Image: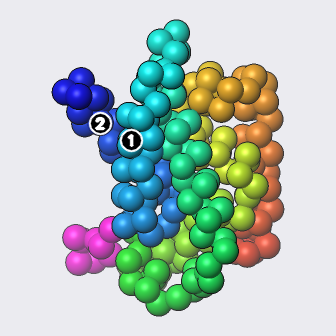
């Protein structure tokens, strides 16, 4: 129990960050991350020590997030343009009083568009993109987590970037 507590402390921020990339609501992301740790604890006996613990844990977290999103599809969805999402914001407030408010507004719009674009990718492409580009895992680590060949990871990341660029190009136009 104590050893698992140490593992939770070591990986909780990374797992939350991964889950939060799937689930926009921070409270839901905390719940899903916690569920992932509970599942990992329950399945600890199935862990194969020949692989890295964090790849096994990431796989559980990603699957838990995807399951959450699938269950949520049956409920009414909120619009990403809803005021409650813009109130949270994704860009930190500038401590510089000379910050350009117009640039901050543009960055906020671009960030919202990026998150919406990532959300429109298929689960396979989104997962590869988030783990590699957002979480900064190597292609080999992503391959181990997803249990696919490294070449498939490269292909999915490339395809995700391409689809995301096309989505953002249509949405943001010349601003991209």
**Is tag 1's residue or tag 2's residue first in the polypeptide sequence?**
2
Q: Residue at x 66, y 41 (%)?
A: 128
Residue count near mark 1 (Cα–Cα under 10 Å), binned few <14, some 14–19, many ≥20: many
Residue ID at (79%, 51%): 162
Describe the element under mark 1 as helix, strand or loop: helix
176 is higher (above) or lower (below) than 127: below
Q: Is residue 170 magenta?
A: no
Q: Is residue 22 visible?
A: yes
The correct choice, above or below, for 63 with respect to 11 in the image is: below
SS for tag 2? helix
Pinpoint residue 159: horizontal percent, then vertical percent.
Answer: 80, 45
Q: Main secondary structure of the magenta part?
A: loop
* Horizontal and vertical percent position of residue 174: 73, 73
Task: Tell me the quadrant of the picture where the N terminus can be found.
Answer: top left
Which image quadrant for residue 30? Answer: bottom left
Please report the bounds of the magenta region as a residue range: 92-99
Q: Is residue 5 left or right of residue 168?
A: left
Q: Position of residue 112 (x, y in %)?
A: 55, 72
Instruction: Examine the structure image and report whether residue 96 is included in the region drawn in magenta.
Output: yes
Q: Quadrant of residue 163?
A: bottom right
Residue 31 falls left or right of residue 172: left
> What quarter of the picture does the C terminus occupy?
bottom right
Q: Is residue 18 above or below residue 27?
A: above
Q: Residue furthest top?
A: 50
Would you name the residue on which mark 1 appears?
37
* Residues at discs 1 and 2 in contact (Cβ within 8 Å): yes
Say if residue 14 shows up in the picture.
no
Residue position marked by numbered label 2 in the rendering: 8
Q: Nearer the viewer, residue 119 or 101?
A: 119
């Amino acid at each position: 129990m104590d050893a698992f507590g140490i593992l939770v402390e070591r990986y909780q921020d990374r797992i939350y960050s991964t889950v939060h990339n799937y689930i926009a609501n921070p409270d839901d992301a905390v719940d899903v991350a916690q569920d992932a740790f509970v599942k990992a604890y329950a399945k600890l006996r199935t862990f194969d020590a020949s692989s890295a613990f964090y790849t096994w844990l990431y796989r559980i977290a990603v699957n838990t997030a995807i399951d959450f999103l699938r269950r949520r599809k049956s409920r009414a969805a909120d619009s990403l343009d809803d005021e409650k999402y813009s109130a949270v914001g994704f860009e930190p407030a500038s401590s510089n009083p000379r910050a350009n408010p117009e640039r901050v507004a543009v960055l906020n719009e671009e960030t919202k568009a990026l998150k919406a674009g990532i959300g429109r990718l298929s689960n396979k492409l989104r997962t590869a993109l988030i783990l590699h580009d957002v979480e900064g895992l190597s292609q080999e680590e992503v391959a181990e987590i997803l249990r696919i060949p490294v070449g498939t990871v490269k292909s999915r990341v490339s395809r995700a970037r391409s689809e995301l660029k096309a989505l953002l190009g249509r949405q943001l136009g010349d601003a991209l």
